[in-house]
Amino acid sequence: MGCGASSAAATGAAPSAKNDPFTKDLKEFVGKLLMEENYAQNLLEELKTKENPTNQVEILLKIILSIIDSVSSTTPPRNEMPEFIAGVLVTFLYHLTVKHAAPAKAVDLKALQDPAAGTAYHVDAKWADSVYDKEAAADPKAALVEALAKEPCSIKVAAADILHFRPTSALARPAVAVALDRERQLILVVVRGTANVKDAITDAAGASAPWMDGYAHEAIAMSARNVFEEVRDQVLALKRENPAFGVRTVGHSLGGGTAGLLALAMHRDAEFCSAVYGTVPVPGKKSKGTYRITAVGFGSAAALNKELTEEVHPYVTTVVHDADLVPRLCLANISDFVALADAMVDTFKAVAEDVKKLINGETPEGYDGMKVMKMISKAAKDPAGLVKDLIDEKLDAAADKAEDAREGDETRLYAPGRLLFLAKPEGGGASKAYAISKGSMATGASKILLKGSMLKDHGMANYAHVLLTGEVLPPPP
């Protein structure tokens, strides 16, 4: 299948979901969808009136509805909303055993903590996590120093080395800190993301607009411009005082997207770039060397089109934690998802009729006897599971139906730069080995897949846990 998604059959067994509460609840919802005539309509009304659902399936359905609403003026579902909700539920079911392509190589996360290897992403994660929740602090800089000093991965930073910290955000002006990382010889520009994950998802689904000589997320491009104007002179002053230091922009979520665009803007600013690189040529096709302006983002929002994403590939890294939804959200991807969910409606109608016949002990047209006996047994024990089996057989072509135009869409947005994709271990066991891949979101892993952990995987605290402790997160409750 295209766009970096692969079926379990193609890449090995999917993570076991037998004891996953989300999977159990999802199958219960699909079972009701199958057997109760007006269930989809009733569910839609319930979602509209329930402000704070506690069931994970309902929480995710409300999130999906808000995302779909963001494109309703340009890409409305062709089905009525009750039927479309049914399509979304069945898409969740279909995606249980579809995963973003991940390499076979397993890596101990602690291997990513080696400063000598030029990674030390755990330090950047500590900074990106620590800038959150400082708006109410009497002394924001002192609060940031205190947060950095906490375990795990205690970082000792002098208050004097935090030169600037605006802990509050405004429209197109995210919270930002400028600090010296003396151990790594870096001038850090740390951009905070949206504090609320639901708001982050809504904000990430923004329009693309011309930027530089490509396209960028309009609101994130404005944020990058405003932050650059705010910190530019101070960063240059710090560079003059610390000539051996490089510049690194860091952020999470929309802050990660902003950090990636900042690094590009810094390279495109001739005066700024000259001040940072000095007499050393900027690395490129004609010269090798070390990039002195870099960026690291965690769960970065899709913010650049393919051409610009590939341009920043050598010096911008986006770390994506497994099913994290935010790096995959852009209007073009959402439109693709709407088309898939609409296709699911038609497929489910056909499959549902077959399953109902099997539940009644009847043989649907086109099924052989031996196969029917197994299906009748499964229909009695796990009707939603049988729905999934039949959909898996019928939907591969429909699942990729919307993908033909992806390559030619110059406005489609991706998380910036090269991708460090952390895929959870198979089976969700106690192993500490994640699978790791490098590439870019423009060449893989950009497709929206509906997973029970897609919100939890986005949390900066969870990125920090994974990278600071080297331990796999437990499955969602």
Image (cartoon, rainbow, N blue to C red):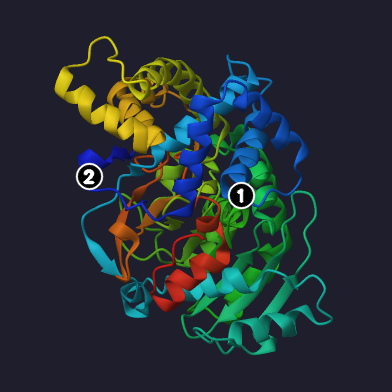
Q: Quadrant of the N terminus?
A: top left
Q: Position of residue 322 (x, y in %)?
A: 41, 54
Q: Which residue lies under the disc numbered 2? A: 11
Residue 376, above or below 240: above
Element marked by disc 2 = helix
- Report the Cα–Cα distance between label 1 and label 2: 31 Å
- Identity of the residue drawn at 79% across and 70% down: 135
Q: Which residue appears at 39% of the width and 53% of the height?
A: 419
Q: Nearer the viewer, residue 392 or 206?
A: 392
Inspect the image, locate mark 1, and give the three-letter code of the amino acid beneath it.
Asn
Figure check: 278 above or below 207: below
Residue pictured at 59% horizontal, 86% vertical = 150
Few, some or many residues within 10 Å of mark 2 (<14, 14–19, 20+): some
Q: Residue 315 carries which label?
A: none
- Badge 2 amino acid: Thr
**Which residue is label 1 attached to?**
55
Left or right: 358, with 302 as reference point: left
Mark closer to the observer (1, 2): 1
Q: Where is residue 427 in the image (x, y as percent from the top left)?
A: 30, 58
Q: Quadrant of residue 79?
A: top right
Q: Quadrant of residue 428?
A: bottom left
**Residue 128 shown left or right of residue 172 in the figure:** left
* Discs 1, 2 touching: Cβ within 8 Å: no
Q: Can see residue 408?
A: yes
Residue sitting nearer the eye, 25 or 3: 25
